Amino acid sequence: MVQHARREAPLECCGLLTGHDDSVDEIVCCSNENKSEVEFSIPPSELFEAFRGIRQRGKRLLGIYHSHPRTRAFPSAKDLDEYHYHAIGYWIVSLQNRSPVVRCFRWEDNTFQETQFQVLENR
Ligand SMILES: [Zn+2]
């Protein structure tokens, strides 16, 4: 996710996280059709293809991520307005500081609540 964010900066990048149960083991990089530094949108056709691939590989959609090239790793007002995937994790990669920051949120009680996650070693 961080590599993808760096590759696309100063534009926002976006993509999907898939895996099994609650364990993410795959990143699906998508394109940001807005080509924007402050918002993102995955083209519907790409999303459709991605969902089909996820199903074919027997995986589950666990999260959606995007980057904030210049701002902190918290949902923006725009993110609050546009978030429509309430059952999955909402990940944000911030490149604001020298060390990238990754946070995960879930939509609960009509707002984003930060959730903890654990990074496991490469297997
Ligand atoms: Zn955002």
Image (cartoon, helix red, strand yellow):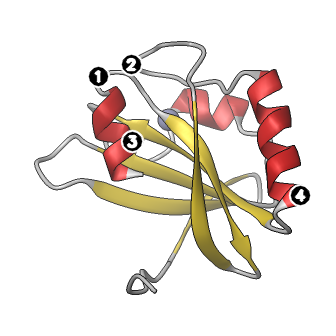
Left/right of residue 33 with respect to residue 53 in the rendered view: left
Q: Residues within 10 Å of mark 2 (few under 14, many from 20)?
A: some
Please say if the residues under marks 1 and 3 sit with CB atoms less than 8 Å apart.
Answer: no
Q: Which mark is residue 55?
A: 4
Disc 1: which residue: 10
Report helix, strand or loop for mark 1: loop
Q: Amino acid at mark 1?
A: Pro
Report helix, strand or loop for mark 3: helix
Where's residue 46, x and y in %? Answer: 75, 28
Q: Amino acid at mark 4?
A: Arg
Please say if the residues under marks 4 and 1 sit with CB atoms less than 8 Å apart.
Answer: no
Count the numbered circles shown.
4
Q: Amino acid at mark 3?
A: His
| Quadrant in the rendering for residue 106 | bottom right
Report helix, strand or loop for mark 4: helix
Disc 3: which residue: 4
The residue lying at 52 percent from left, 62 percent from top is 104
Q: Is residue 108 visible?
A: no
